[in-house]
Image (cartoon, rainbow, N blue to C red):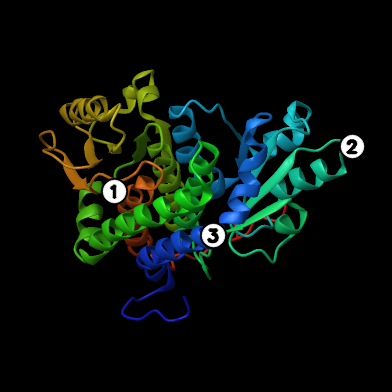
Amino acid sequence: MKSLGNFPDPFIAEIAGQPEALRRAGNGAIEQTEALEAAAAPAHQGRIVLSGMGSSYDACYPAVTALAASGVATLMLDAAEVLHFRLPILRDEDLVVLVSQSGESAETVGVARALRAAARAPTIACVTNGTDNTLASLADVALDTRAGEETGPSTMTFVCALAMLGALARTIAGATAHDAAAAIAQEADRAADAITALVADRALPDRLVAWHGGRATTVILGRGAARAAAEMGALTIKEAAGMPVESLQAAQFRHGPLELAGPDLAAIVLATEPETAELDRELAADLAKLGAAVLLVTTGGPAPRNTMSIAIGSLDRLLSPAAAVVPAQLLAWRLSLTSGRTPGSYLHASKVTTRE
């Protein structure tokens, strides 16, 4: 996104660019049905492993969750663990899906190179932004997310990876590649509309900062596919605002971390998964009773007392994290301005991590 339009900096422009990018990814999936079929073909012969690092790893949660719900066992392992400790579990009949927005992430490329050097290697499918990169050159099948240019923390690349992984998951689960891609394109439109509505509320970033209140401890809690938004939201705030934030599976929070609850805690609870939405609402209510500042992201409906609530509507779980993460993105952007940082800039890290 070369032009900021009405936006003051590239980071908020890229946050606002997510709806267009999502639609581009959905249409791109339709144009890549042959590649989707080729990537899904080995899935019924051996095990399926999804792997990546950072935001690319986080994007795998919805696909793995949806495949499990359809009875398809799938492993999700970060690429560094695969590279150094778990390569021996992979066989030539397996499917390894490697996700990297740049196609140059050190550990993910390392896995592809190690597998290519093996005498017997599984099928490698990659999901990258564009296919002119090292990972795509090493893969058997390359899927292009069509995210486009991005300079700040992952926003457009994250949601576009969700879309392509969603199309692949639906194909693996038994849909034809055409039907899978068409369904994802339709759901991408709905998720894009939800993001547009959130970004259009120009007062929302200030309300989020007021809600947070500069509290010492911040957590983002989610389950199932919503773990993608929880992990991604925490990562974005760390990157953009330089603030420590912890992401946890929501049920795990009651197993010890509940001791963090109180006036110094800001908790974002993502209650978007139908199976556990009521449990997450109860957790939000309990945290509010203990004095924490609670932001509840839901599909809709009334919120518990003393909580701030944002509804994203009922979206397909493969793409609901694309909308559920937006409040954390807007908070990260506004906090970065408040702290005097240049929004979306890096002080110590870089956009692409090419060394381990």
**Where is residue 263 drawn, in percent x and y?**
22, 34
> On the rendered structure, is 123 left or right of 205?
right
Q: Do the residues under discs 1 and 3 have CB atoms within 8 angstroms?
A: no
User: Where residue 119 is drawn, which disc sits there?
Assistant: 2
> On the rendered structure, is 221 left or right of 301?
right
Question: Which of the 4 quarters of the picture holds residue 224?
Answer: top left
Q: Nearer the viewer, residue 28 or 211?
A: 28
**Where is residue 277 drawn, in percent x and y?**
26, 30
Q: Which residue is mark 1?
A: 214
Q: Which residue is mark 3?
A: 145
Kindly identify the residue that appears in the image at 19 percent across and 26 percent down. Answer: 290
Disc number lying in front (2 or 1)? 2
Q: Amino acid at mark 3?
A: Thr
**Where is residue 113 drawn, in percent x and y?**
80, 47
Q: Amino acid at mark 1?
A: Gly
Question: Which of the 4 quarters of the picture holds residue 255?
Answer: top left
